[in-house]
Every structure is written in structure tokens, then in C-alpha cells.
Image (tube, grey):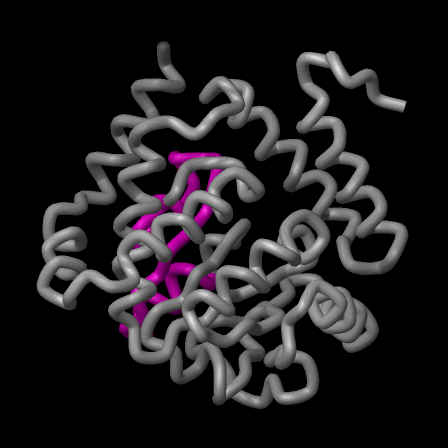
């Protein structure tokens, strides 16, 4: 039992949620390690959403609203930690959700699909329809749905690995990453990088989508034109080097 007044209560609750996801077959062994690495960077940014991340969230909302075929990519950690937020964001954007895994098994992909459906997602791609292939990528993450990531023009890639992010960029897709490490290849290769913890970032992104939904395209494009991902990452690095 975690005390209500524990200074790191939320972080510890997220750990428990991830462990539960591991027991249910959603999260891989390696996913637990990746989460711990992210926690270390979260300590360094003060375990709160910083101003550079808010800039990225606004740009991400504009990009998703401008996209003709946006897709949210989901791995095991994302499903375990934020399935409800993913479902809500997809509903707000009327966009698709696709399961994409580095340590892929059909059983695990199916379990994640079931978990997402329980969270309110009606249709989940990338489980039984991952017949397309991302060029120049050789991990299991190369397997994607034609209806989803393969034909998407904008892909939200939370908790991503750098290889696929780089490959998606080469395919001409606008990529939006959520990554606590501003030094990672994912963070540096993505068009927009939200350096923040997933369960903090997604609700803020949902709220920003709601705020910008009725703005005209010219306004949304102006947000993207002003956004500079390299500058945002540099601002985050300076915060870490306090």
C-alpha cells in the first residue's frame, strides 16, 4: 500500500500499472527496463511538464489536426500505462490506432488489442493485418498495417525506438514522439518531440486538440511554421543541466 502523502506516489503507481501489464502479457521484460530509463530522465526534469514540452504539445496537436490520415502507434508500455488516454485522443481526432511491437508475438499483440478494446477502442490495426513492411527496417517493428501506419501521413509514436522513427521519416511521414530522453535518436529524428512523461503528456495533448479543433488551417499551419524541434530539445537539455 502506497501512502497517500508519499512524495513519489504517482511514479510508484505507474510502476505498479506497468508490472500488472507485464503479468497480463502486455509488457515485455525489456519494456520494464525501458521504463526505468525513462524514470531517470523524469527525475532530471523535475517530474513535471516543462514549458518546452508544452510548446511541443501545441505543435503536435496542430499537426494531428492537419493530418489527413493520422495514426497512433501503440506498444506494450503505452497500452499498460495509457490505454484510456489513447482511446480518448483517437476519438477526439477520429484517427486510427495500430499495435506495433519490437518484441512481437501474435499472442502479445492480441492481448494488447484486447486491452485497448476494453479501454474503448473500437478498431485496432496491426494485429492480424500487419502485412505491409517499412523499407530498410529489419526488426519486427517493420510489420505494419496498410490501412494504418503504412499509408499514414502523420504518426504519433510514444515510447519509440529510434530505428523505426528514422524509417518513418524517410517514408515522408510527419512523426510526433513522446520521449523523456531529449538526447535519443527518436527525439532527434522526430519532427516534433514531446519531452515529458506519457501519462502527463497525453491528457495535455487531448486538451490542446480540443482547444485548436475549430481553428482554421492557416492558424494551425502557423503554429507548425513557428515550431523548432531542435530549439525545443536544446531548451530541455539546458533544463536537465541545471
Magenta segment includes 168: yes
Q: Which residue corresponds to the image point at 64% horizontal and 65% vertical from the top-left?
A: 101
* Quarter of the image that includes the C terminus: top left
Q: Position of residue 16 (x, y in %)?
A: 81, 37
Can residue 241 be seen in the rendering of this structure?
A: yes
On the picture, is 51 further left or further right than 202? left
Q: Position of residue 178 (x, y in %)?
A: 46, 47
Say how many tags the image has. Answer: 0
Magenta segment includes 51: no
Q: Which residue corresponds to the image point at 31% horizontal and 43% vertical from the top-left?
A: 56
Give the image quarter of residue 103: bottom right
Give the image quarter of residue 219: bottom left
Q: Nearer the viewer, residue 175 or 139?
A: 175
Can residue 105 be seen in the rendering of this structure?
A: no
Q: Position of residue 116 (x, y in %)?
A: 69, 67
Above or below, 54 relative to 43: below
Q: Which residue corresponds to the image point at 36% horizontal and 14% vertical from the top-left?
A: 241
Q: Which residue corresponds to the image point at 67% horizontal and 32% vertical from the top-left?
A: 36
Above or below, 94 relative to 133: above
On the picture, is 42 further left or further right than 129? left
* Quarter of the image that includes the N terminus: top right
Q: Nearer the viewer, residue 123 or 25?
A: 123
Which residues are the magenta region?
A: 164-193
Above or below, 8 relative to 204: above
Give the image quarter of residue 65: bottom left
Q: Nearer the viewer, residue 103 or 223?
A: 223
Q: Position of residue 27 (x, y in %)?
A: 76, 54
Amino acid at each position: 500500500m502506497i501512502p497517500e502523502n508519499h512524495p513519489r506516489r504517482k511514479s510508484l503507481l505507474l510502476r505498479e500499472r506497468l508490472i500488472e501489464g507485464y503479468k497480463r502479457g502486455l509488457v515485455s521484460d525489456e519494456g520494464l527496463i525501458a521504463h526505468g530509463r525513462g524514470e531517470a530522465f523524469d527525475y532530471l526534469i523535475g517530474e513535471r511538464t516543462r514549458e518546452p514540452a508544452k510548446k511541443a504539445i501545441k505543435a503536435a496537436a496542430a499537426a494531428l489536426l492537419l493530418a489527413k490520415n493520422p495514426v497512433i502507434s501503440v506498444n506494450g508500455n503505452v497500452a499498460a500505462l495509457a490505454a484510456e488516454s489513447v482511446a480518448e485522443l483517437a476519438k477526439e481526432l477520429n484517427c486510427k490506432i495500430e499495435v506495433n511491437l519490437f518484441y512481437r508475438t501474435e499472442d502479445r499483440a492480441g492481448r494488447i488489442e484486447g486491452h485497448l478494446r476494453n479501454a474503448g477502442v473500437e478498431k485496432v490495426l496491426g494485429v492480424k493485418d500487419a502485412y505491409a513492411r517499412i523499407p530498410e527496417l529489419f526488426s519486427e517493428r517493420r510489420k505494419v498495417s496498410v490501412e494504418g501506419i503504412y499509408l499514414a501521413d502523420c504518426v504519433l509514436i510514444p515510447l519509440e525506438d529510434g530505428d523505426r522513427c528514422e524509417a518513418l521519416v524517410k517514408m515522408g511521414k510527419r512523426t510526433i514522439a513522446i520521449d523523456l530522453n531529449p538526447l535519443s535518436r527518436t527525439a532527434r529524428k522526430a519532427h516534433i518531440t514531446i519531452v515529458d512523461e506519457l501519462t502527463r503528456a497525453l491528457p495535455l495533448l487531448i486538451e490542446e486538440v480540443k482547444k485548436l479543433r475549430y481553428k482554421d488551417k492557416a492558424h494551425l499551419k502557423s503554429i507548425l511554421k513557428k515550431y523548432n524541434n531542435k530549439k525545443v530539445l536544446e531548451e530541455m537539455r539546458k533544463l536537465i543541466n541545471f
